[in-house]
Amino acid sequence: MASWGYLGFQDSASPLMEQLIFFHDHTMVVLILIVTFVGYIMFYLFFNFLVNRYLLESQEVEIIWTILPAIILIFIAFPSLRLLYLLDEINNPSITLKTIGHQWYWSYEYSDFLELEFDSYMIGTMDLSESGFRLLDVDNRVVLPMNSQVRMLVSAADVIHSWTVPALGMKADAIPGRLNQISFFINRPGLFFGQCSEICGANHSFMPIVVESVSVNSFLDWVSSCLKS
């Protein structure tokens, strides 16, 4: 999770987030080159009082400054399109999880198991343990197996919400009457925190998300304990 003063991305926990970080770094390199080049020219012009009369009107220069930005945009557009298709790709899922946004909590349903569903509320400050995170911890975490393809169905019961977990690179709008679908693959164990990213009312800031990634055996043990209770 992010810490105070941290300006970068959270450590990735899925291949998709890794690709998003790679694309961000790729785009930043291009932008730095452009800003450096333009900044150098502007700085040079402040101290240059000479005029090149051949550059005042030049067909060749106009061709260059038209084609060069187009080439740069292609170098940004192709990786972006590739990443968009990767984010929408639905592989063979090992497990399906359905989440419904409410004002102001999330409800989850494991479609592969009978009667395995629960609501997830934020833990209030007064009830929070010393090891808990204020405004981020919940009473019921989303437990998912790592190294397994997860399909998630997202919807809402009242207003528009947005199910977002930055470490997984996932952000899906929860819209009433519509079922959105996302897919992700968690490649390491841990706790991953998120929040609703769509302004949904007075308590919009108080419906966090906690995903707990565990091994497959631990996940099956958790499912068995939930079904027995």
Image (cartoon, grey):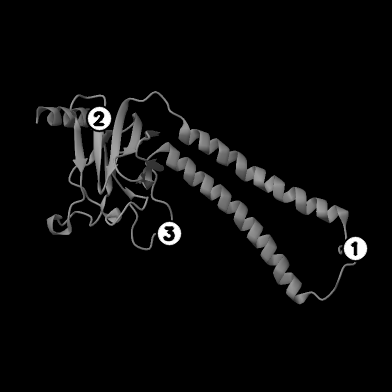
Residue at 17% x, 58% y is 125
Q: Is residue 61 left or right of residue 12?
A: right
Which quarter of the picture shows residue 108?
top left
Eyeballing the image, is 90 above or below 102?
above
Structural crowding at the residue carrying mark 3, measured as other residues with C-alpha within 10 Å and reported as few (<14), some (14–19) or many (≥20): few
Q: Point out residue 227 in the picture as x, y percentages from the top left corner.
A: 13, 28
Q: Point out residue 18 in the picture as x, y percentages from the top left corner.
A: 45, 42
Eyeballing the image, is 46 above or below 171?
below
Instruction: Compute the Cα span from label 2 to label 3.
Output: 35 Å
Q: Earlier in the sequence, mark 1 or mark 3?
A: 3
Given residues 1 and 181, the one toward you in this image is 181
Residue at 33% x, 25% y is 94
Disc 1 marks a residue whose amino acid type is: Tyr
Q: Is residue 167 left or right of residue 19?
A: left
SS at mark 2? strand
Disc 3 marks a residue whose amino acid type is: Leu
Which numbered tag is attached to residue 7? 3
Q: Earlier in the sequence, mark 1 or mark 2?
A: 1
Residue at 29% x, 55% y is 205
Q: Point out residue 119 in the picture as x, y percentages from the top left corner.
A: 20, 40
SS at mark 3? loop
Q: Which residue is mark 2?
A: 110
Q: Earlier in the sequence, mark 2 or mark 3?
A: 3
Which quarter of the picture shows residue 216?
top left
In the rendered image, the residue lying farthest to the right is 54
Instruction: Compute the Cα span from label 1 to label 3.
Output: 46 Å
Tags 1 and 2 touching, CB below 8 Å: no
SS at mark 1? loop
Q: Which residue is mark 1?
A: 54
Eyeballing the image, is 220 above or below 58?
above
Q: Nearer the viewer, mark 2 or mark 3?
A: 2
Tags 1 and 3 touching, CB below 8 Å: no
